[in-house]
Amino acid sequence: MQKKRTGTIVILAILLAIVAMGLFLYNSPMFERKPPQITLEKDIHWNLRNPIPLQIKDDCGVKFLRIILSDGENNIVLLNETYATPKKEIDTYVEYPKTGFFSKSSTLILKVEATDGSKWNMFRGNKAVAKAQIFPDTKTPNLLALTNSYKITKGGVALVAFKAEDENLKDVYIKTNFGHLFEPTPFYKEGYFVSLLAWPSHEDTFKAEIVAVDKAGNESKTRVKLFLENKRYRSSTIALKESFIEGKITDLAKRYARDFNTMDDLAKFKFVNETLRSDDEKTIAKVTSAVTPMPSNKRIT
């Protein structure tokens, strides 16, 4: 009887050890069960020049990566990499092959396979597959300046009308040499646009260029041809009258100055003419310059 009890205890101990080992392995990072995360857009318009960004992440680390481009009949392996040290994050780019692949197909398939370094799945790791449908597009948008003002005066505005067409048109804007983007307004019918262009008085010169970009990144540009008229704005000097200071100047100073009670007539005038006017000019400039700031790499030189 004693031997049976001892045998039963041993068997139970072995079973408990097996269960404990199983739980340990099941929850161990070495046996992580999450497949790699592949960041890739499902539908991509590609001009075959700009690389396609690709990101793969995995808690255990990516051990194997394969990238395949196919037109349904022909395949080419763009990347077939095994990493001796698994990488938890891979940021790379897919480039169109310069040789070994030619297709006239209107669509391509980009397939990405990633396997991590986990011991799960009989030590084969977790595998993830992502596919993207590629729409090759190497044609630039059709862009035509229809009409515009003959000239633009420094501190003034001009008008331009143009036509921009593309099956996959993404963005249309007008950029300047001083870092502003003007967003045109659709008018007349589809594909036609109109926009006002402003030449700030503090800018020495003015250049404007219409830009049309499609979903594949193809870009068309055309310069807006304007005659530039430089205008000098006069600075005038006026005589101060007591009635003027006691009237509007005093009213404004009393409303906006915090130390009005300590001000003499000269201090009131200086506050209104310098401090208050400066604030107003900044507000006007901010409102009238409410256009999209342009990255330095998009500015005209």
Image (cartoon, rainbow, N blue to C red):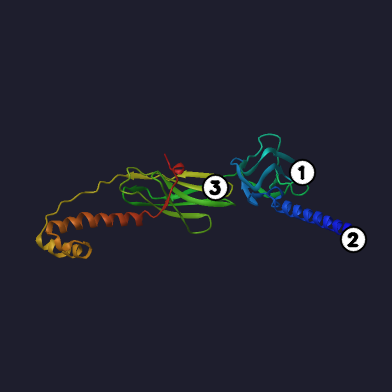
x then y, percent, for residue 105: 70, 45
State how far apart marks 1 and 3 are (Cα): 32 Å
Quick check: 272 left or right of 2?
A: left
Q: Nearer the viewer, mark 1 or mark 3?
A: 1
x then y, percent, for residue 63: 69, 42
Quick check: 79 left or right of 173?
A: right
Residue at the left extreme?
242
x then y, percent, for residue 162: 47, 51
Q: Residues within 10 Å of mark 1 (few under 14, many from 20)?
A: few
x then y, percent, for residue 217: 56, 46
Q: Which mark is residue 1?
A: 2
Three-letter amino acid code of the residue under disc 3:
Asn
Query: Dividing the image into 4 quarters, which one contains the C terminus?
Result: top left
Q: Earlier in the sequence, mark 1 or mark 3?
A: 1
The residue tagged 3 is 142
Query: Dividing the image into 4 quarters, which one contains the N terminus?
Result: bottom right
Element on which disc 3 rests: strand
Q: Nearer the viewer, mark 2 or mark 1?
A: 2
Three-letter amino acid code of the residue under disc 2:
Met
The residue tagged 1 is 73
Q: Earlier in the sequence, mark 3 or mark 2?
A: 2
Q: Are marks 2 and 1 in contact (CB under 8 Å)?
A: no
Q: Nearer the viewer, mark 3 or mark 2?
A: 2
Q: Earlier in the sequence, mark 2 or mark 1?
A: 2
State how far apart marks 3 and 2 are (Cα): 96 Å
Three-letter amino acid code of the residue under disc 1:
Glu
State how far apart marks 2 and 1 are (Cα): 74 Å
In front here: 113 or 135? 113
Q: Which mark is residue 148?
A: none
In front here: 104 or 135? 135
In front here: 104 or 162? 104
